[in-house]
Amino acid sequence: MATTVFPYVPAYITVHLGAPSDNAENVTVRFSDYVKNVASSEVYPTWNENALRANILAITSYALNRVYTEFYRVRGYPFDITSSTAYDQQFSNGRAFFSTISVLVDELFDDYIRRVGFIEPLAAKFCNGTSVTCAGMSQWGSQQMASRGAGWLQILRSYYGSSIEIVTNAPLLPPQSSYPGAALRPGSRGRAVALIQRAINRISQNYPAIPKLRADGIFGPATQNAVVAFQRVFGLDPDGIVGRVTWNTIERIYGGVLGLSELRSEGLRYEDLAWDGPEPLRQGDRGERVSQLQFLLAIVGQFVTAVPTVAVDGIFGPATREAVLSFQRYENLPQTGEADDRTWDALFDLYSGIDNRVLQNRAVFPALSGSATTAANVRQRLEALGYSGANLRQELLAFQRANGLQQTGRLSAQTAEAVTRQYRAAGYDTSTRMTQYPGYPLSAGSRDSA
């Protein structure tokens, strides 16, 4: 849980020179120097360059995961990571850096690994692979692979899976805290409130005594009741106010139930976080914040015919500007074509309403838990019903035309209900139950039955 949606590279990182509970010194160093120190302590500078690159990216990604999840900070420690290999990575304060490693780190320290569709840097655990083995990357194994001709990305995917990708040129910023700076209480509004509402909703899946609530960004009675329940479950003062202690506890538990600091995690996705940005976005901008804006516009565009859908490609081009203008007209906002604070807030409010009333409605989407998989799921059902086209819009149009529905080509609740109804009537199962071996082999073309 972080108010900054996408990870940044901290200019500095604070390292505890020992295990977390040791009475040891904390040192603050440049993040790039930290990576150089660990890489110079963990691997050999004479290794194949592809092995060095793979290891440097793993070191960077692991450290960024500790920073992004505020793993130690939310537990009350005044540091970001330890120097103990029993907990983190080897850091030797004051050591010299190997020149070969230093050159590569200068190139790579603002790149990191993540799983496709997830936000947080991968907790890319590793070990030497000889005296110690682990579920992550084998350092000596990476060198052996590189010696046989494997590239650095091939090495990483062989250990962390084919679903990883590399984020490049992450922004370099001063260290930041996710805490909004002031306590959240009844009457508070905004993205920070929506963030804790979503976190509490996810936590409540593991702790049913905590009631679910609507993530609308408004700290009303329902949110207060949920906060009080959370505080009671975790032994905090049940005052119904989200101060720093409650905020940190929510973040710690939320990260724990998602496994954000584990190699295999449930992961954070676009729709799990509040949406904002420090500066307006305009035509010509590129990057993760643009992708974030496009994701919201694409979801809203499926339900609001006045807003054209856009591709999520991270490029603020003419199509994205037209979608922003259309949304601003729809919301009676100043038509600037730029995503400023008022546009972000209105867009998130509308998205949040769609998410709560439609996408999270299991009567409409019984097998879904989030909007990111909705379109793919509905398209799968349409294809099972015999509708096929170049894209989902064509399939929806054909289905709407055949069933006397408004022909928008968009994924409305009415259309989704009709698709699900016909899918069930055709004998397909819409439950999400996992069963044991069905008694026959599964192959291309196999289908679940009711």
Image (tube, rainbow, N blue to C red):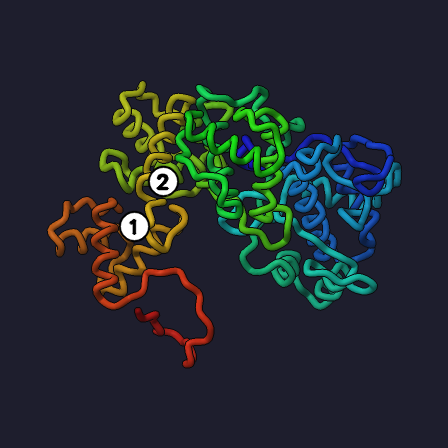
Name the residue nearer the viewer: 148 or 176: 176
Check disc 2 and give the amino acid type.
Asp
- The residue drawn where x is 53% and y is 48% is 206
Residue at horizontal 38 percent and vertical 37 percent from the top? 296
Sequence-wise first label, 2 or 1 = 2
Residue underneath mark 2: 355
Q: Position of residue 295 (x, y in %)?
A: 40, 40
Residue 178, given in percent of the width and then of the height, sits at 59, 29
Q: Quadrant of the N terminus?
A: top right
Foreground of the two, 427 or 284: 427
Q: Position of residue 332 (x, y in %)?
A: 27, 21
Image vertical order of residue 331 relative to residue 89, above or below: above
Q: Tag 2's secondary structure?
A: helix
Residue at numbered disc 1: 363
- Give how far apart the Cα atoms at labels 2 and 1 are: 13 Å
Which of the two residues, 387 or 269, is positioned nearer the viewer here? 269
Q: Which amino acid type is shown beneath numbered disc 1?
A: Ala
